[in-house]
Amino acid sequence: MQKRIAAVYMRGGTSKAVFFHDHDLPKDPEIRDRVILAAYGSPDPNRRQIDGMGGAVSVTSKVAIISRSEDPDYDVVYNFGQVSIDRPIVDYKGNCGNISSAVGPFAVDEGLVKIEEPMTRVRIYQKNTEKLILAEVPVRNGRFDEEGEYMIAGVPGSGSKITLRFSDPGGSVTGRLFPTGSLVDTLDVPGVGSVNLTIMDAANPVVLVPAQAIGLSGIEIEEIENSESIRAKLEAIRSLAAVKIGLVKTPEEATLRSQAVPKIAFVAPSQKYKTLGGMTIKTNEIDLVARIMSMGTLHRSYAVSGAIATAGTARIEGTVVREMLNPKAANKEVLRIGHPGGIIEIGAKVEKNGDLYEYKEAALGRTARRLMEGYVLVPQKYFSKA
């Protein structure tokens, strides 16, 4: 027999997730994760998630758990989980910025917030990072209005613009904007050598590496997808950085149990390239190029949390990202990052207070859409402890 769980399937930015009300899931964390994994068809050793809702890639294997906030300073509580495809793990470290863009629309349509037209501001308590996200959600006739002309790279067509404001995103996972205390760290990476990099924890910890440090120009796409060697180098750097910032004890543990955090990206100066869709991005249309990995594979656009860290480090002299930045863009309010799917624009407000930097706010536009609503069916056996 199977049990029915009320659920909504939503696209948020360039990701998709099943959205659950917290009260519809088991309260016991172990049973809850067993149920979520079963709903997604994980773990699947063939990495297809053929027996569940998962889409067989990291950007479609995400879960959002929502509840009404009891704190008057917030409207809803949003707990994010990265569902492993081939391992029995739901990783609650860090957040997904793209899925964050669907939380406001979900809250509006589920009656969790007071509606104001034409724009409802939803105050989201992001449980994983203990931070505030303010979502400005277009509303018409009491519902989220998804129709509009705003476009984001990586999603066909257009939609209404949802503005996300990530308040004080620094130290979301480690408690420090720069977890190591340094703007630049040097790691001796087996199989790679000595690598200078910047690690910033803003929305998520992100390891930012100069493309040239791993023998790349920065505009590679197919080369990364087709090269196990390149991916292995990036994972070697990422896993060692995870140890450096105290998330795990060994690189092996990072690869096995902390696939989603920290993220790793490589950056390079702005240059001409072709997107996955065949569109040519000109050098003067962007301020730098970057590529980010998502659980061991190339993100076909760019993670929002990665963009927050990339834009934040670009504001600070001495980081590896600032060195790649077009000098004319140093003081611009909005940074344009060229990625495999096109361009992502993000604003970052960073201030220096004595010897410390404070990341005040990151802001960007996204689109979202409610794709399906109803029930997820999960076999009864998963509702008891193994």
Image: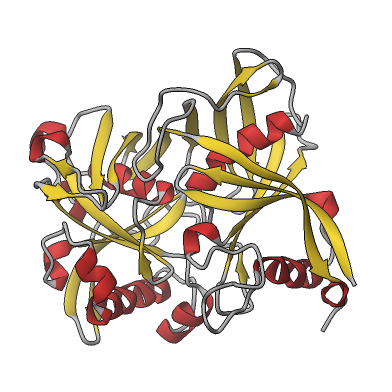
As rendered, which of 245 and 44 lies closer to the eye? 44
Identified at 25% across, 43% down, the residue is: 337
Side (left or right) of 58 relative to 296: right
In the depicted structure, whether residue 16 falls above or below residue 286 = below
Q: Position of residue 104 (x, y in %)?
A: 62, 33
In the depicted structure, whether residue 218 falls above or below residue 216 = above
Q: Position of residue 54 (x, y in %)?
A: 59, 64
As rendered, which of 149 and 111 lies closer to the eye? 149
Side (left or right) of 247 relative to 81: left
Identified at 41% across, 72% down, the residue is: 242
As rendered, which of 226 and 308 lies closer to the eye? 226
Quadrant of image for the N terminus: bottom right
Can residue 185 be seen by looking at this rendering? no
Residue sitting farthest toward the right: 1
As rendered, which of 118 and 310 lies closer to the eye? 118
Identified at 17% across, 77% down, the residue is: 194
Q: How is the image coloured?
A: secondary structure
Can residue 248 be seen by looking at this rendering? yes
Quadrant of image for the C terminus: bottom right
Q: Position of residue 377 (x, y in %)?
A: 79, 63
Side (left or right) of 303 relative to 76: left
Residue sitting farthest toward the top: 117
Q: Position of residue 131 (x, y in %)?
A: 57, 43
Give the quadrant of residue 139. Answer: top right
Identified at 41% across, 76% down, the residue is: 243
